[in-house]
Image (tube, grey):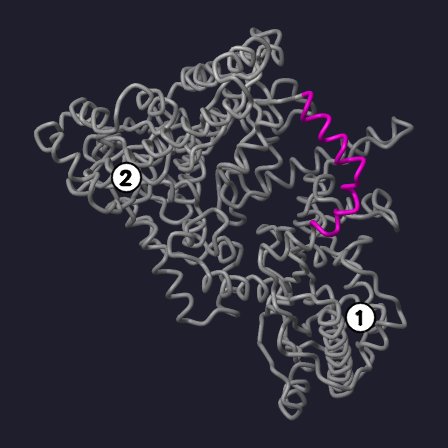
């Protein structure tokens, strides 16, 4: 009996029963009534039905689906009743991850594939009890779970009203009220008498209505601070030893000290607010915008097209306002910026009297794009020299991969780990190393492990990546060893067990990766399982609907979910209009010039690689802001490796080759030294000196780490350059 025969018999049965169907490469998916999970009929599902005819197998599958569907409906029915009885607010989601709120405490509950798997080995009441136990709010007995499921009335559709923040605080305060006994109050009163600074803190909080008042924890001298309402600086003053005596002598009492501090704080706070609002009003009238992101400096920048005028809203502003009025300070600041012709003292005074004008925000580059970093033209490149450099790094990688033990690694990651990263190695496509090379290296390492296992009494650590590579290529040698390594009763932990290995052994280990929502399905295993693909698309729809336009391009934005989809799965679960919309979002990302941090996150490039959208890289090649984004500041430079790797998978041509050549021609030791010099400024400052008693040893370790990072970046450029040359770049 073949799968196709079962599906041919199943389709009319499902249609007659009005069961929602979805065709996928693996087979057929039936959607449960609650729309939070699917029942996949694939090759694995029919293995136990081989002795039956296609018609009887199809009827059995429909009956199995309907039973699970009824059980799921019963559990969700009981869950809603229980949540309403316990005054919990439930926010259902088609992803299967429901949000539960009780008295301001948030939790999630998985009623998707996790619930389906529970029902395959538990009764409905047991499954409901397991779900409730995962919430950690209240325990649910088996008898109560059974009673909830059997309630004939429909669950309350109107959710329990969410409590306001004030009500939530009041509720939890009442929970802890028994702790504040009379004896505790007496002890606190005694402590306040012995520590007047503590009493002063409480007085200032009540007087100013400002919770941001407290002692400086790590200061050498005892210091109290009050944060200004703009949040960019604090008023600080000493309170210990002779400082406190001096304050008492000057102001007479604790109440006098309080009055002086409140007066000083209010004066400076009002002056700071007036100064900042007036400054931004006047700059907005000049057509300036504010740099909305402090990506490589302190303070604020303003300008029309790039960073032109710098303003420090921190301690520097507070110190100047101690001595100068806001008008005097602003007049001097505009003179320092060369704007005294446009902004006069009278204009400053007039701006202070008018309502504040909101200034626009955008990302401002350090300098105009045309004057910023530029890539060398293709004609200026020495192809033979770059070929030699690229070959050198690729050969160094090959040599290190063959070593049994590496004392001083050349790169940040172990060589065998690169296979799992799709931007580094595309199965069946890359030639800088190929599938045969990976298989040969994995078998060599596995034979070494087997030989060492025979020599030692205790089993040596298992190289999980080597085992994963062999299993992915159909070599079953690690299978038996893994069964012994992870016996019945062992459990999954993301820091101890490789996700890829667990997915390769799905169904054979004591745990299932479908129970772990945060696990990553490895691209090297091919097509995403239908349950995961459907869930990712559903999550994308919900997150995209709620996201602001700017959030689409964040590292944790909705595009990351589409980047996890392969080409086939995307077309199975997304509509043509959705795919077109994602394509337009990727083009919008590649065209943007107002936010250069966008190019630090490469989900749009990964999507373009999966879908074959070459025009995304073509748009990047025309964008003048990319070079500034990826070469300015520490963060930008460290994203260049993934940029050229993904770009070379999308369109291996002249643009990516120019980027690769730039990276390959950098001096790795000089670049590493620059990074260490930058880190060193803060590393041995103040109390940090005690953490690093041996500066020379620390600097040597830093230098080695930075050099490995630079080499790995050059290896990425070598791989990208190789792909461009293989694609016909001459």
User: If the image is split into quadrants, where does the C terminus sit?
Assistant: top left
Residue 700 in sight: no
Residue 188 in sight: yes
What is the crowding at mark 2: few (fewer than 14 residues within 10 Å), some, or many (at least 20)? some
User: Which structural element holds mark 2?
Assistant: helix
Q: Is residue 294 above or below residue 14?
A: above
Residue numbers of the magenta segment: 173-194
Q: Is residue 420 above or below residue 632?
A: below
Badge 1 or badge 2: first in the primary sequence:
1
Q: Quadrant of residue 588?
A: bottom left
Residue 187, magenta (yes or no): yes
Of residues 690 and 174, the one nearer the viewer is: 174
Residue 383: x and y in percent read: 31, 29
Residue 207: x and y in percent read: 51, 36
Residue 277, labelled with which disc?
2
Q: Is residue 270 above or below residue 99?
A: above
Residue 440: x and y in percent read: 65, 38
Tell whether 408 sits left or right of 63: left
Disc 1 from disc 2: Cα separation: 61 Å
Q: Is residue 204 above or below residue 89?
A: above
Q: How many marks?
A: 2
User: Which structural element holds mark 1?
Assistant: helix
List the residue tagged with mark 1. 119
Of residues 233 and 27, the one nearer the viewer is: 233
Residue 713, magenta (yes or no): no
Of residues 625 and 274, the one nearer the viewer is: 274
Q: Quadrant of residue 187?
A: top right
Q: Quadrant of residue 329?
A: top left
């Amino acid at each position: 009996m073949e799968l196709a025969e079962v599906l041919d018999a199943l389709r009319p049965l499902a249609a007659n029963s009005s069961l929602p169907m979805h065709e996928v490469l693996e087979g057929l998916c039936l959607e449960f009534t609650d729309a939070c999970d699917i029942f996949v009929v694939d090759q694995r599902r029919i293995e136990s039905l081989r002795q039956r005819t296609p018609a009887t197998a199809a009827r059995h599958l429909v009956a199995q689906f309907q039973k699970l569907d009824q059980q799921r409906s019963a559990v969700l029915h009981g869950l809603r009743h229980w949540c309403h009885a316990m005054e919990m607010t439930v926010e259902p989601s088609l992803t299967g991850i429901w949000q539960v709120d009780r008295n301001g405490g948030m939790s999630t509950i998985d009623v998707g594939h996790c619930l389906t798997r529970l029902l395959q080995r538990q009764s409905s009441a047991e499954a409901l009890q397991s779900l409730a136990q995962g919430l950690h709010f209240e325990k649910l007995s088996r008898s109560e779970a059974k009673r909830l499921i059997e309630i004939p009335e429909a669950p309350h559709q109107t959710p329990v009203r969410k409590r306001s923040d004030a009500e939530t605080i009041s509720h939890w305060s009442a929970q802890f009220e028994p702790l504040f006994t009379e004896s505790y109050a007496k002890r606190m009163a005694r402590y306040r008498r012995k520590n007047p600074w503590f009493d002063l803190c409480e007085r200032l909080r009540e007087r100013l209505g400002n919770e941001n008042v407290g002692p400086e924890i790590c200061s050498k001298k005892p210091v109290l601070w009050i944060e200004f309402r703009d949040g960019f600086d604090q008023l600080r003053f000493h309170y210990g030893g002779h400082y406190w005596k001096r304050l008492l002598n000057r102001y007479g009492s604790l109440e006098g000290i309080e009055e002086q501090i409140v007066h000083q704080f209010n004066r400076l706070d009002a002056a700071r607010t007036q100064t900042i609002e007036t400054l931004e009003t006047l700059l907005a009238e000049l057509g300036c915008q504010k740099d909305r992101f402090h990506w490589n400096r302190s303070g604020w920048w303003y300008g029309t097209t790039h960073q032109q005028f710098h303003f420090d809203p921190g301690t520097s502003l507070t110190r100047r306002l101690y001595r100068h009025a806001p008008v005097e300070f602003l007049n001097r600041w505009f003179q320092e910026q060369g704007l005294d012709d446009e902004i006069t003292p009278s204009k400053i005074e007039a701006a202070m009297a008018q309502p504040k004008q909101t200034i626009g925000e955008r990302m401002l580059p350090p300098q105009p794009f045309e004057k910023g970093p530029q890539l060398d033209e293709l004609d200026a490149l020495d192809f033979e020299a770059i070929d030699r450099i690229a070959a050198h790094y690729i050969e160094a990688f090959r040599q290190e991969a063959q070593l049994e033990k590496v004392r001083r690694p050349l790169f940040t990651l172990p060589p065998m780990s690169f296979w799992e990263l799709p931007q580094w190695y595309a199965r069946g496509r890359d030639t800088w190393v190929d599938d045969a090379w990976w298989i040969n290296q994995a078998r060599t390492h596995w034979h070494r492990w087997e030989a060492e296992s025979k020599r030692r009494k205790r089993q040596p650590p298992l190289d999980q990546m080597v085992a994963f590579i062999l299993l992915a290529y159909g070599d079953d040698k690690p299978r038996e060893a893994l069964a012994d390594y992870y016996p019945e009763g062992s459990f999954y932990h993301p820091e101890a067990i490789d996700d890829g290995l667990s997915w390769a052994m799905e169904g054979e280990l004591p745990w299932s990766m479908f129970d772990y929502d945060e696990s990553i399905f490895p691209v090297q295993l091919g097509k995403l399982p239908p349950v995961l693909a459907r869930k990712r698309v559903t999550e994308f729809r919900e997150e995209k609907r709620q996201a602001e336009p700017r959030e689409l391009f964040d590292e944790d934005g909705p595009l990351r979910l589409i980047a996890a989809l392969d080409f086939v799965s995307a077309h199975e679960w997304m509509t043509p209009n959705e795919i077109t919309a994602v394509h337009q979002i990727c083009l919008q990302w590649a065209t943007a010039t107002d936010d250069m941090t966008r190019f630090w996150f490469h989900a749009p490039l990964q999507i373009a690689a999966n879908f074959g959208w070459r025009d995304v890289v073509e748009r990047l090649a025309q964008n003048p802001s990319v070079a500034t984004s990826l070469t300015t500041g520490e963060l930008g430079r460290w994203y260049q490796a993934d940029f050229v790797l993904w770009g070379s998978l999308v369109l291996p041509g002249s643009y990516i080759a120019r980027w690769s050549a730039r990276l390959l021609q950098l001096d790795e030791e000089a670049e590493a030294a620059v990074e260490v010099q930058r880190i060193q400024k803060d590393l041995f400052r103040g109390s940090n000196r005690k953490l690093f008693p041996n500066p020379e040893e620390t600097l040597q370790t830093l230098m080695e780490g930075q050099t490995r990072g630079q080499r790995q970046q050059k290896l990425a450029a070598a791989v990208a350059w190789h792909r461009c040359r293989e694609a016909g770049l001459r």
